[in-house]
Each structure stands twice: as structure tokens, then as C-alpha cells.
Image (cartoon, rainbow, N blue to C red):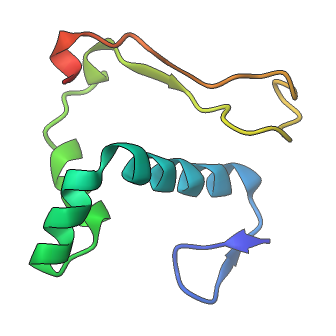
Amino acid sequence: PYPAAIPDHFNTEVMIYRGYWMVSWFKREFGLREMQQAREQGVEPEQLFDELVNGVPPGSMGLTLQPYWSPGIREPGLEAKGAMIGFGDVHT
């Protein structure tokens, strides 16, 4: 079992765990400003991310994510690699 969003609970679905990992990775790599703002406001950084996500139009302006970041997935296979495809100046 993998840790769930609720403390002291677990989730047995590995792909949901990978989603949790992805949010943590994104926060660490791209969310320094939001983490600082969250500390100042006394809220969780994910709350600020939720507010930002609400402003993204459906389709994410062509940005696509392949979240195969770590080994151990049977499908598509151990050789799978993650990618973000479709970045443009509209995404910054």
C-alpha cells in the first residue's frame, strides 16, 4: 500500500501514488514562489496551485504530459520515459 492524501490511510493503486509523486515533484521543481507565498499566508501550496489551475483553459493550450518518470511500470514498460510535449511561449 502507498500513503493516501488522508494521514494514516493508504492507497493500493500504484498509478494514484505516481500522481501524488508527480504533484510533489512539480511543487519542488517549479513551485518555489508558491511555497513561499503559502508559508506567508498560512495555507498549503496545493491550495495556491488549485487557484492557478482554475485559470488554465481546457486543453492546456496544447501542452501534453507523459508521466512515465520512474521505473517499475509494467505498461508501457521499464524503458518508458516521461515527457512534457507542446511547450510554447503561452505556457510561461
- The quadrant in which residue 61 appears is top left
36 with respect to 28 (left or right): left
| Residue drawn at the location 67% of the way across and 31% of the way down | 68
Q: Is residue 69 above or below residue 48?
A: above
- The quadrant in which residue 82 appears is top right
75 with respect to 53 (left or right): right
Image quadrant holding the C terminus, namely: top left
Q: Is residue 56 above or below residue 13?
A: above
| Residue drawn at the location 23% of the way across and 44% of the way down | 53
Q: Residue furthest bottom?
A: 8
The x and y percentages for residue 58 are: 25, 27
Image quadrant holding the N terminus, namely: bottom right
| Residue drawn at the location 48% of the way across and 56% of the way down | 24
The x and y percentages for residue 8 are: 63, 89
The x and y percentages for residue 73 are: 83, 38
The x and y percentages for residue 33 are: 19, 53
**Residue sitting nearer the eye, 45 or 62:** 45
